[in-house]
Image (spheres, grey):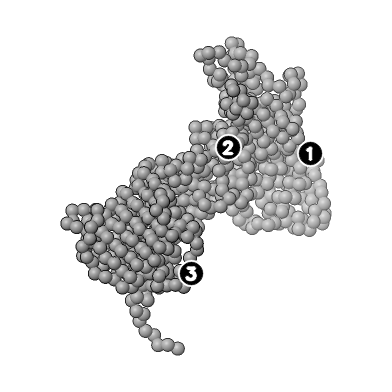
């Protein structure tokens, strides 16, 4: 065995560089953080061959004096913290004093800086671990760092790098993150001499639109939550804009891009009820918090953090995002652009709770004209409980003359039902045009939200069956029912064991009356058996209620009267998250009259 000995400084620097500098994008991140910390308002980035040949960052920040240039390339030298107390209240992006030193140890580096008011600029060069002396130079106020031939002295590390295209993509993502987190700074990006991005100084919303595009901002809701000195702002894409990958998820804590398990879990839980299967949410969120309440000194890359009050932060994020996603919507783009939800179509949350169940259990109506034909407007007024207007026109949807409004003041957002399509969809007419509703998906969401509300308020009541439903069950179902009687009762079920192979359902939740009791209980027992019963109500409650709601929702191919259709539309308008069913699928779309005219080439 070799004797213990001190490592040479050069080898120490290269080992440290391995922790901080993984690829060209890591270099760019360190240089951009330094420029931002220096107070720059304009940053220019030039990259060649994906960053393998050249990375040059120029800023108009406060600069570095000639005397301090050697220290800038020395490990553990920094202007950002000076004491242990500073380490627990970090307000800058950089603070470890390793970035420039690590970069210099694995590249050919040139640093030129000119402090405002100084006589001239100074520059310093390094070739790997060999650092030259500072010398006078020419440069505008600010700093330029030029990194060439990355990993030239570590060929093994260079072999692990990907293609030029891939490495540039990683660099581009770094500058997008910086541009999103610091909207007040102008950024310019060039690759191989070609302009690849330019973002002027802007407000946060304008910068998000410039970086992520108009489609994202049109499909997103703005969030602005504050409580106990914590703030959460940004934009949340509505579920219809979900992604196949996590490529559009940006979360910043005090201006720093982070990837944190606690934050990820809070966001995933907030989107759980509205995101379809394996789709991923898209968002740009900014969390502002007292620096003393967050520890950023966890990993050299500085993307991992710890919160001192982790549970409180989790709940704050979860409830804030859930609130922003829960408002009923009043309109979408066309079927051709169904992923785009217009911000001006959002309806303020209704100041009332969801109407009580049961619903859609009316007897068939007779005495009206055909169920598939729209009724006069005063007929709808009677259905909705509003007073009849003797002067109201018999057809509120008629074409108006010059100077007349085509919008009836009492027209609700989702309009009035016209009829059913193949027993699956409800067709309705609103102010803007045609509304198409998936009646099962919409009703499923309504029942689900009712179940959640009743569980929260402990008002989930059971409805005893006149004739118990008995069915054959396997041994696992029998055992699960016997062991979870208390849980079943909490959920509004009375299930008893008749024999070693027979179960009897004597009561169901009142809201689910009419559901297939056997299928519902079998699925429920399966959910309970595959989860931890002690944690079921706390951690998996919503999944269980979603299963119940699916069984309680009106099925396809069931004819509905206009009364029932309109009741469903009205309940959708006051139900949270009514744009998606419990599985994240859309519940309705809107086609405007202008789009219909275009389809039929009217006016041409």
The residue under the point 76% across, 47% down is 519
Return the x and y of residue 422 as percentages of the image width and height.
74, 32
Return the x and y of residue 3 as percentages of the image width and height.
40, 88
Return the x and y of residue 130 as percentages of the image width and height.
31, 73
Q: Above or below — where is 28 with respect to 365?
A: below
- The front one of 176 and 471 is 176
Q: Above or below — where is 389 with respect to 164?
A: above
Q: CA distance from mark 3 to mark 2?
A: 44 Å
The residue under the point 60% across, 11% down is 390
Q: CA distance from mark 1 to mark 3?
A: 75 Å
Q: Secondary structure at mark 1?
A: strand
The residue under the point 49% across, 68% down is 160
**Residue 462 picture quarter:** top right
Return the x and y of residue 402 as percentages of the image width and height.
53, 13
- The front one of 561 and 154 is 154
Q: Above or below — where is 459 with respect to 351?
A: below
Q: Residue furthest top?
A: 391
Q: Residue furthest left?
A: 119
> Is 31 situated left or right of 498 in this image?
left
The residue under the point 79% across, 43% down is 468
Q: Which residue is under mark 1?
A: 466
Name the quadrant of the N terminus. Answer: bottom left
Q: Which residue is under mark 3?
A: 159
Q: Secondary structure at mark 2?
A: helix
In contact (CB < 8 Å): disc 2 and disc 1: no
């Amino acid at each position: 065995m070799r004797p213990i000995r001190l490592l040479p400084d050069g080898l120490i620097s290269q080992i440290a560089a391995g922790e901080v500098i993984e690829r060209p994008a890591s270099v760019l991140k360190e240089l951009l953080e330094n420029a931002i910390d220096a107070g720059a308002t304009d940053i220019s980035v030039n990259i060649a061959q994906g960053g393998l040949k050249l990375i040059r960052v120029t800023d108009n920040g406060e600069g570095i004096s000639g005397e301090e240039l050697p220290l800038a390339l020395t490990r553990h030298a920094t202007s950002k913290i000076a004491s242990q107390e500073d380490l627990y209240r970090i307000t800058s992006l950089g603070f470890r004093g390793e970035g420039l030193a690590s970069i210099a140890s694995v590249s050919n580096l040139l640093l030129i800086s000119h402090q405002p008011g100084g006589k001239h600029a100074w520059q310093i060069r390094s070739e790997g671990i060999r650092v030259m002396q500072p010398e006078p130079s020419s440069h505008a106020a600010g700093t330029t760092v030029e990194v060439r031939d990355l990993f030239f002295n570590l060929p093994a590390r260079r072999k692990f790098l990907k293609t030029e295209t891939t490495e540039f993509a990683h660099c581009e993502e770094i500058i997008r993150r910086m541009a999103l987190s610091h909207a007040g700074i102008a950024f310019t990006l060039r690759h191989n001499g070609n302009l690849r991005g330019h973002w002027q100084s802007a407000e946060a919303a304008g910068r998000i639109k410039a970086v992520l595009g108009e489609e994202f901002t049109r499909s997103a809701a703005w969030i602005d939550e504050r409580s106990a000195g914590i703030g959460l702002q940004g934009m949340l894409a509505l579920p219809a804009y979900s992604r196949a990958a996590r490529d559009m998820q940006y979360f910043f804590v005090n201006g720093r891009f982070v990837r944190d398990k606690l934050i990820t879990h809070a966001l995933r839980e907030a989107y759980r009820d509205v995101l379809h299967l394996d789709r991923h949410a898209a968002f740009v969120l900014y969390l502002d918090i007292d620096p003393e309440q967050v520890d950023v000194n966890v990993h050299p890359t500085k993307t991992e953090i710890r919160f001192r009050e982790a549970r409180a932060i989790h709940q704050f994020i979860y409830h804030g995002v859930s609130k922003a996603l829960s408002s009923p919507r009043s309109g979408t783009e066309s079927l051709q652009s169904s992923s785009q939800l217009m911000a001006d179509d959002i309806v303020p949350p209704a100041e009332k709770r969801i109407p009580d169940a049961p619903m859609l259990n009316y007897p068939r109506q007779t005495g009206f004209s055909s169920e598939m034909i729209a009724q006069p407007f005063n007929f709808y007024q009677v259905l909705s409980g509003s007073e009849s207007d003797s002067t109201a026109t018999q057809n509120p949807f008629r074409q108006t003359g010059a100077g007349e409004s085509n919008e009836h003041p009492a027209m609700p957002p989702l309009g009035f039902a016209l009829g059913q399509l193949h027993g699956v969809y409800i067709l309705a007419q609103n102010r803007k045009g045609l509304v198409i509703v998936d009646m099962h998906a919409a009703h499923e969401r309504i029942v689900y939200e009712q179940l959640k509300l009743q569980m929260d308020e402990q008002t989930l009541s059971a409805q005893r069956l006149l004739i118990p439903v008995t069915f054959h069950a396997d041994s696992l179902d029998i055992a699960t029912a016997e062991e979870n009687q208390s849980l079943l009762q909490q959920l509004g079920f009375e299930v008893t064991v008749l024999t070693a192979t027979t179960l009897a359902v004597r009561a169901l939740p009142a809201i689910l009356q009419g559901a297939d009791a056997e299928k519902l209980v079998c699925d429920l027992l399966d959910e309970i058996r595959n989860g931890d019963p002690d944690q079921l109500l706390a951690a998996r409650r919503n999944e269980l209620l979603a299963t119940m709601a699916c069984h309680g929702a009106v099925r396809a191919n069931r004819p509905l009267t206009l009364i029932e259709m309109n009741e469903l539309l009205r309940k959708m308008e006051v139900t949270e998250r009514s744009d998606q069913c419990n599985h994240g699928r859309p519940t309705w779309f809107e086609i405007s009259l202008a789009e219909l005219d275009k389809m039929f080439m009217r006016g041409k």
